[in-house]
Image (cartoon, helix red, strand yellow):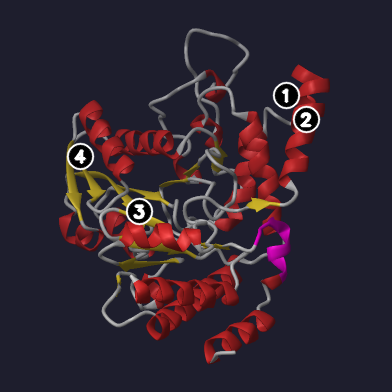
Amino acid sequence: MSELMSAAWELDAEDPLAGVRERFLLDDTVYLDGNSLGALPAHVPGRVEDVVRRQWGELRIRSWEESGWWTAPERIGDRIAPLVGAAPGQIVVGDSTSVNVFKALVAAVRMAGEGRDEILVDATTFPTDGYIAASAARLTGRTLRPVLPAEVPSALTGRTAAVLLNHVDYRTGRLHDLPGLTAAVHAAGGYAVWDLCHSAGALPVGLDEHGVDLAVGCTYKYLNGGPGAPAYLYVRRGLQGRFDSPLPGWNSHAEPFGMTSAYTPADGAVRGRVGTPDILSLLALEAALDVWDDVPVARVRAKSLALTDFFLRCVEAYVPAGRVENLTPVAHAERASQVALRCADAGEVMRTLIERGVVGDFRAPDVLRFGFTPLYVGFADVERAARVLGQVLGTA
């Protein structure tokens, strides 16, 4: 047994989260793509069967009240809240990340008011956020200016209405300075909107602690909610009375069953709702969140850093020199829970890795991405993934 194999066994034996792996349905594959789609929690199929057969099949419309369907968006939002550092009553679950980005950004511009005619957007953002920001700028008559996250403090002016930023760069895994950038936006009189898709469930976020105004995120990555699981919207409590959604729907009305022609928004985060909730996906997500019972986010973060440190150590040992370039920051304060490696033939390399039982993903034109979900990825997985990568690149 090699030195790195022995080290992996020792680290797994000492891992306080090792037992959480049993809460998921996994096989012999090394699954390092949880930053795209989380693994299936083992109890979710049975819970979904109950929702379909009993709640829908037997209770039918009674389940809106008797099974708690109507309050699911807020109830599940409160389950997510501690994972992103938020008190209850500030998160509502529903719609897609893109739709929630639109709600949050337009609402932020409306709160900023006249005289603030510019929106800043992360120039390295996931493309959809950029598309939504451009549309929001057109609809609100503002100018959109893409800037790198590090350039935000110097780019802010008295004209800045809102700033849309990604907590983590989806390509490289770089973790941006949420506390510092939020403080800078506030000092300039603007509103900070954060996309947490690649950080929620992988590391502490601290929405309340750092005074974030609005935030959105998906639930199918590190939160393991399932493909297409509904996203969430965070509205800081102090802003909820001013939150003016650009998508007012009957589900966010103060009297949703009053069926009045005039719209009156509900109180609290509920005004972030729009239409009828997607109950099957919502309740699958609610069940998936059970895996977080008794799992501190700080412990998840510690393991995430240990996993990614160990992977980089193994890559250095196993991969032929010059075949890959690490794009992910080495500094812990700047690293999320993935490692991105530049490789000239990345697409073909990833296809071969998957054939050999190591699943990551590829981002054009030349990036191999490996996501490390601490709830179910172990150190032996990490060693094996790097060893197989070295074998593939050594024969390519």
Looking at the image, residue 90 lies above or below residue 29: above
Kindly state the secondary structure of the residue where label 1 is placed.
helix
Kindly state the secondary structure of the residue where label 2 is placed.
loop
For label 4, the residue is 116
Q: For the magenta stretch, what is the residue range?
A: 19-27
The residue type indicated by label 4 comes to: Arg
Q: Residues within 10 Å of mark 4 (few under 14, many from 20)?
A: some
Quarter where residue 376 is shown? bottom right
Kindly state the secondary structure of the residue where label 4 is placed.
loop
> Quadrant where the C terminus lies?
bottom left
Q: Nearer the viewer, mark 4 or mark 2?
A: 2
Q: Residues within 10 Å of mark 1 (few under 14, many from 20)?
A: some
At 59% from the left edge and 18% from the top edge, which residue is drawn? 256
Q: Position of residue 63 (x, y in %)?
A: 76, 24
Q: Position of residue 54 (x, y in %)?
A: 82, 28
Going from the N terminus, do you reach mark 2 or mark 3 first? 2
Of residues 23 and 181, the one nearer the viewer is 23
At 25% from the left edge and 31% from the top edge, which residue is drawn? 135
Going from the N terminus, do you reach mark 4 or mark 2 first? 2
Residue 171: tell me if it is visible: no
Looking at the image, residue 353 lies above or below residue 61: below
The residue type indicated by label 3 comes to: Asn
View extreme (bottom): residue:
3
The residue type indicated by label 2 comes to: Ser
For label 2, the residue is 67
Going from the N terminus, do you reach mark 3 or mark 1 first? 1
For label 1, the residue is 64
At 25% from the left edge and 47% from the top edge, which residue is drawn? 121
Q: Position of residue 202 (x, y in %)?
A: 52, 62
For label 3, the residue is 166
View extreme (front): residue:
395
Q: Position of residue 167 (x, y in %)?
A: 38, 57
